[in-house]
Image (spheres, rainbow, N blue to C red):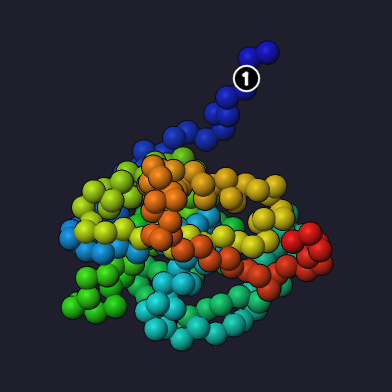
Amino acid sequence: ADKKVNISRAFDMDLLRSSIEKGSLALEKVDNKDIVLVLGKTGTGKSTLINFFAGKKLHTTFYTSILSGQTDVIKEVFEASDPLNNFEIGHMKKSKTKSINCFCRNSNQKILYIDSPGFEDTDGHEMDIATSVMLSQVAKKCKSLRFVILINYASLLEDRGGAMRAVLKVTRDFVQDFVKEKKSFMFLFTHTNEIKNIPDSL
């Protein structure tokens, strides 16, 4: 049987163009810089982590979301009292980050932290394409490149290894020999407070 093609939503060229244009502002700052690239799926805490790197005071609060228009879900989340511009912390499944953004602790430092939309972003293929284009340019222009990859710990149980497959795909996109380059990678597991009834096998 022929495979069905999902044509429910047209490809949004304006979204693709907008994301690349906004990302170009960050791209101008990466020349000859040591880059720390913060990666992860939407909702893993990338923007929260960069606000922490920036010395912003984080506090816990409670966020209420509605599932399927009926069920209220209340969860404890982190907020920044005075978040960095363009690094707003989101608490929904939909990504708040629409393009790559960069942060440098001070003008004298050569280390630049880059946040990006989550891979397999909730805004669709347009964001994935724009992010891939921008990150490939980051890799070409920077002096050195290191990675902080965030993984939602709960996803290890919920999506049958999908989170790890996505991580492996990202590493293959950037390095040919992971064993040789492994010291350039740091993996952080987030949302561990949401895990309940962890199987003994883990």
Q: Quadrant of residue 36?
A: bottom left
User: The C terminus lies in which quarter of the figure?
Assistant: bottom right
**Side (left or right) of 6 relative to 133:** right
> Residue at left 22%, top 75%?
109
> Could you say where residue 94 lies in the image, as x and y percent from the top left?
55, 56
Q: Position of residue 3 (x, y in %)?
A: 62, 19
Quick check: 54 above or below 47? below
Depth order, front residue of 121/163: 163
Relative to 155, say whether 15 is above or below: above
Mark 1 is surrounded, within 10 Å at the Cα level, by few (under 14), some (14 to 19) or many (20 or more) other residues, namely few
Q: Specify the farthest residue to the top.
A: 1
Quarter occupied by residue 29: bottom left
Q: Which residue is mark 1?
A: 3
Q: Residue at x 46, y 63 (%)?
A: 186
Residue 159, position as x, y percentages in the image: 68, 49
Identify the residue at image location x=81%, y=67%.
Answer: 197
Front residue of 176/49: it is: 176
> Helix or strand or loop: what does disc 1 sit on?
loop
* Amino acid marked by disc 1: Lys
Residue 8: image x %, image y %? 57, 32
Can residue 127 be seen by looking at this rendering? Answer: no
The residue sitting at 37% across, 75% down in the picture is 84
